[in-house]
Image (cartoon, rainbow, N blue to C red):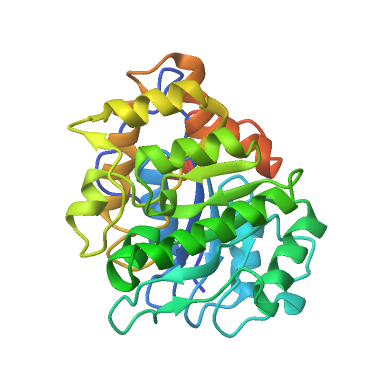
Amino acid sequence: MKTGLLCLALALPAYGAAILPVIDAHSQFDDRTPAAQVLEHAARAGVSQVLLSARGRVTPAQVIELASRHPGCVVASVRTKGRAELDEQKQPEFRAMSEIILVHAAKGRRAPEVNVPADSPHVEEAIRHAIARGWPVVLHYELRWLAAARGSETRDKRMAELNALLARHRQQPFALIHMAQLDPGPAATLLERHSNVFFLTSHANTLAVHESRQPWTDMFSGEALAEPWQALMLRYPGRFVLALDSVWPEHWSERYAEQVELWRKALGKLPAEVAHAVAHGNAERLWKLPPAVAGSGCAALAR
């Protein structure tokens, strides 16, 4: 894996003190995406840190190596799907755990359909693993897809399952990647009922939605948050965490910086304390990360 210093030929923005620091709390890369490509586009976006896990033929050891070479940029995250087993990833260098997939639509030939209950043995094992390491449990539910594919009754059963899981582990943070494909109403209900639930914003923006056939939640109206989502974020500023979930080579492209910039613009319209909480502060608290500083970490690789 080539992870040397980057040579960025294109003009880069100047990330000074006025630029909102950003932590990407969940992304991945596979064997078709060189590590240098990941670092390059994280640097172009001015991101401070990326919680990064392996996909495809990338091994956990390669993720650890990348994090060791660029500790200010990459936070190594345990892989929870594919060939790697949890008991093979107990190295102290790991500081997070990737998503546990429970409900997942097929993504062509790249990813199969998954629909497993939370009490499945491998899911319970992964939850125990995260709790033992003191990490948030990241859950992957595509509930809008589930309702369309299997009916609202099936979706409601899985929501009841999620509520029960959150209630059983009230002291454990659970983060729902991709906003669990929820609308503002159901998301508000979860936030009201459970103080331990958090939302990761991956794929939840207009750029990602328009380039996908999946029914992701779009939190935006133009370059601002849609009013219902803005109201929820203002009410629960400590419960939303910025994440991109870049995976494939086309994600680690100009698209990455474009999404980060869209989020910076939208968060810049909110009170500063809310913007900083969502962009980096909540991730720092949940994953025990050092404070993000604009121009540092991945962004510093652009110099």
Residue 139 coordinates in the image, percent (x, y): 55, 59
Residue 218 coordinates in the image, percent (x, y): 27, 44
Q: Quadrant of the C terminus?
A: top left
Is residue 52 or residue 37 the one in the foreground? 52
In the displayed structure, does residue 204 sit left or right of residue 76? Answer: left
Relative vertical location of residue 93 with respect to residue 13 in this rendering, above or below: below
In the displayed structure, does residue 49 sit left or right of residue 254? Answer: right
Residue 49 falls in image quadrant: top right
Give the residue drawn at x 71%, y 63%.
127
Residue 142 falls in image quadrant: bottom left
Residue 152 coordinates in the image, percent (x, y): 35, 62
Q: Is residue 6 visible?
A: no
Give the residue drawn at x 45%, y 47%.
243
Give the residue drawn at x 69%, y 48%.
167
Give the residue drawn at x 57%, y 49%.
175
Relative vertical location of residue 273 with respect to residue 191 in this rendering, above or below: above
Residue 300 coordinates in the image, percent (x, y): 49, 39
In the displayed structure, does residue 175 sit left or right of residue 253? Answer: right
Is residue 245 or residue 145 the one in the foreground? 145
Is residue 209 or residue 276 the one in the foreground? 209
Q: How many marks on residues? A: 0
Extreme residue toward the front, this view: 153
Is residue 160 or residue 216 the one in the foreground? 160
Q: Is residue 249 visible?
A: yes
